[in-house]
């Protein structure tokens, strides 16, 4: 697969990606290289990466605990202090090797340390390959609220190596699949239709589907790097999905909800709102709902929890002038941004989702 030129950086694939990485390391003569991992990427991915790096520079491994609950400014402070202790300077490089938490937080750590040092993203989960590592967004959660603190800073490059997916649990693969389905719904109907029957997918060609999904997101981001217009399309399913994810994260007695699982619930809910605003037909809504419910388990959310989730919407970073903003479907494969709705319609959406 050819490299994708995104907004100010490139996304490289498979073995060729490591050739570009080594060329970058040689040209920039980094003083030190730091590889940021969690316990999973340390065990399953780091042994595969290290032999691929050609350098005389010292390589230091920094491991942090996995999980959205650790994506905080407190964790960043710890890593910044470790970088100082290990002698990092403006000529250092950070390689973020892991899922979305690692690439989001690692990019934020690098883009703020000493006013910004170079970093490379090597995503190791399907979700981070098709979503978190593309677009230059870096950030951490604050008070349980998703991505409240962050920057838009591009990496030197992104390397997509799908061989890392071989060690990924099935639920994590499904979580990434949610974003690929979203890309089809908002921008390319033919991409969505490829996933309508998973039994018909030839997973030997799955790299091509990953490539197409990344291309869809990259094209949108390139048109609107700072999210003032069309990039808001990528928020479909995320306004309510992030609120659900935040609520489950804050309430430890609830099940451990993956990002993609919450976003799928958000996509069904926001498709219902699209239906009520006459942006999609009843048949389109039924197709979306049945397809997503066939792949993902339904999340149990009672009436009291619905109210708490709706209250969280006011903190959504996508809001403007105090108003909740939705990106809604305008037919399958198209989107309409900056759409408002009332609480009654949101409550009806939860009721329809439950039934």
Image (spheres, rainbow, N blue to C red):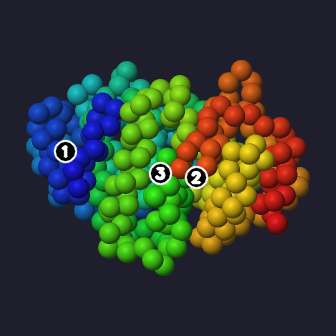
Quick one: quadrant of the C terminus? bottom right
The answer to whether 44 appears left or right of 289 in the picture is: left
Quarter location, residue 158: top left
Quarter location, residue 162: bottom left
Q: Name which residue lies at 23% across and 47% down.
A: 3
Q: SS of the residue at dot 1? A: helix
* Number of marks in picture: 3
Label 2 crowd (10 A; few <14 / some 14-19 / many >=20): many
- On the image, the x and y values in percent for residue 222 come to 38, 33
In the rendered image, is residue 159 in sight? Answer: yes
- On the image, the x and y values in percent for residue 264 come to 63, 57
Q: Is residue 320 above or below residue 284?
A: above
Q: Nearer the viewer, residue 41 or 22?
A: 22
The answer to whether 297 appears left or right of 342 in the picture is: left
Q: CA distance from mark 2 to mark 3?
A: 8 Å
Disc ID at residue 21: 1
Residue to which mark 3 is pinned: 188
Q: SS of the residue at dot 3? A: loop
Q: Nearer the viewer, residue 300 or 268?
A: 268
Q: Name which residue lies at 69% across and 61% down.
A: 283
- On the image, the x and y values in percent for residue 165 come to 37, 66
Q: CA distance from mark 1 to mark 3?
A: 31 Å
């Amino acid at each position: 697969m050819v490299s994708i030129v995104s907004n100010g950086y490139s996304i490289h694939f498979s073995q060729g990606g490591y050739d570009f990485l080594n060329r970058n390391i040689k040209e920039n003569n980094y003083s030190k290289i730091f590889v940021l991992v969690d316990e999973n990427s340390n065990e399953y991915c780091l042994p595969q990466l290290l032999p691929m790096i050609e350098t005389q520079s010292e390589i230091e491994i920094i491991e942090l605990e996995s999980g959205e609950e650790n994506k905080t400014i407190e964790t960043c402070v710890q890593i910044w202090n470790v970088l100082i202790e290990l002698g990092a300077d403006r000529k250092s490089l950070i390689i973020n090797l892991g899922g979305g938490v690692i690439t989001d937080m690692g990019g934020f750590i690098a883009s703020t340390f000493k006013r910004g040092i170079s970093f490379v993203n090597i995503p190791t989960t399907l979700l981070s390959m098709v979503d978190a590592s593309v677009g230059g967004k870096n950030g951490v959660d604050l008070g349980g609220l998703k991505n409240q603190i962050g920057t838009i800073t591009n990496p030197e490059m992104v390397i997509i190596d799908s061989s890392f997916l071989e060690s990924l649990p099935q639920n994590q693969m499904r979580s990434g699949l949610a974003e690929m389905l979203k890309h089809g719904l908002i921008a390319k109907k033919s991409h969505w239709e490829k996933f309508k029957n998973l039994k018909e997918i030839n997973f030997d060609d799955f790299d091509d589907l990953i490539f197409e999904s990344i291309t869809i997101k990259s094209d949108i981001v390139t048109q609107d790097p700072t999210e003032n217009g069309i990039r808001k399309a990528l928020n479909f399913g995320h306004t309510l999905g992030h609120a659900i994810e935040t609520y489950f994260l804050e309430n430890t007695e609830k099940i451990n909800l993956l990002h993609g699982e919450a976003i799928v619930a958000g996509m069904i809910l926001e498709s219902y709102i699209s239906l009520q605003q006459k942006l999609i037909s009843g048949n389109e809504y039924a197709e979306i709902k049945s397809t997503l419910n066939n792949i993902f388990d339904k999340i149990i959310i009672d009436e009291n929890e619905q109210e708490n989730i709706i209250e969280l919407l006011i903190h959504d970073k996508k809001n403007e002038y105090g108003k909740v903003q939705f990106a809604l479907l305008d037919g399958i494969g198209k989107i309409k941004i900056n759409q408002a709705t009332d609480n009654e319609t949101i409550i009806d959406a939860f009721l329809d989702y439950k039934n």
